Image: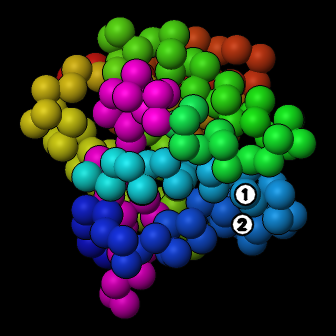
Amino acid sequence: MEIKRYEEKYKDDVRFVCLNSNGPCKLNEKQQHLILTTYCDYFIEQEGNNCFVAVNKDDKAVGYILCAENYDKYKKIFRKEYLTRFRKIEISSRITAGVSSFFQAMYKKNYPAHMHIDILPEYQRLGLGHKLVDALCENLRAKGVKGVCLTMWSGNEKGGSFYKKYGFTLLSKWLITDVFALKF
């Protein structure tokens, strides 16, 4: 396994991982569109220099870490170019995507970057998550970014344990969402 900076050739792999990191995708087309638009496409299309992939021996991405290094820049572009990917009648999808970064906005002063990490189930618990976070943190530190945050579903005990072990701080719990952050 190797960690590499994201390249366009990994786009389909990354999108597959995004939809299948919790097991085979059982989402309908509308749900897939919402997940990819909200949690994947902005990052690989706009900030590929802040994204890293874990690749197998066949150079196929089996995991990733995606990051927006500046919340304000992300918000401006996401609202203008990505929310418009939902048809006007898809009000619930627009609202869901629009509020997806609510927590990042609350903590942007101390943690201007926000990240998403996913690894296919068969490649989890092999140390790839740690290596992906290492690559991202080194990249952000070199740019002078002072911190990164993320949100996750509160029921994700393995994820919470991983972030705590890595050194992330649990900033808050909001209903079913936990907010973790790491200061550099």
Residue located 29% across and 23% down the image: 147
As for residue 70 lying within the magenta part, the answer is yes
As for residue 60 lying within the magenta part, the answer is yes
Residue located 47% across and 28% down the image: 76
From the top left corner, tell me how far across and down residue 175 is, in percent: 77, 17
Decide: is 22 above or below 144: below
For the residue labelled by badge 1, is the local secondary structure a helix, a strand or a loop?
helix
Amino acid at pointer 1: His
| Eye-nearest disc, 1 or 2 | 1
From the top left corner, tell me how far across and down residue 70 is, in percent: 33, 27
Quadrant location, the N terminus: bottom left
Mark 1–mark 2 distance (CA, rounded to whole Å): 18 Å
Residue nearest the viewer, comparing 166 with 67: 67
Amino acid at pointer 2: Gly
Which residue carries the number 1 mark?
33
Residue 81 in sight from this viewpoint: yes
Which mark is on residue 92?
none
Residue 3 in sight from this viewpoint: no
From the top left corner, tell me how far across and down residue 15 is, in percent: 56, 66
Residue nearest the viewer, comparing 58 with 105: 105
How many numbered markers are drawn? Answer: 2
In the rendered structure, which segment of residues is drawn in magenta? 50-77
Residue located 75% across and 71% down the image: 24
Residue at the bottom extreme, as displayed:
58
Mark 2 residue crowding within 10 angstroms, few (<14) / some (14–19) / many (20+): few
For the residue labelled by badge 2, is the local secondary structure a helix, a strand or a loop?
loop
Which residue carries the number 2 mark?
23
Residue located 36% across and 71% down the image: 8
Q: Along the horizontal axis of the image, is 94 left or right of 131?
A: right
Decide: is 26 above or below 137: below
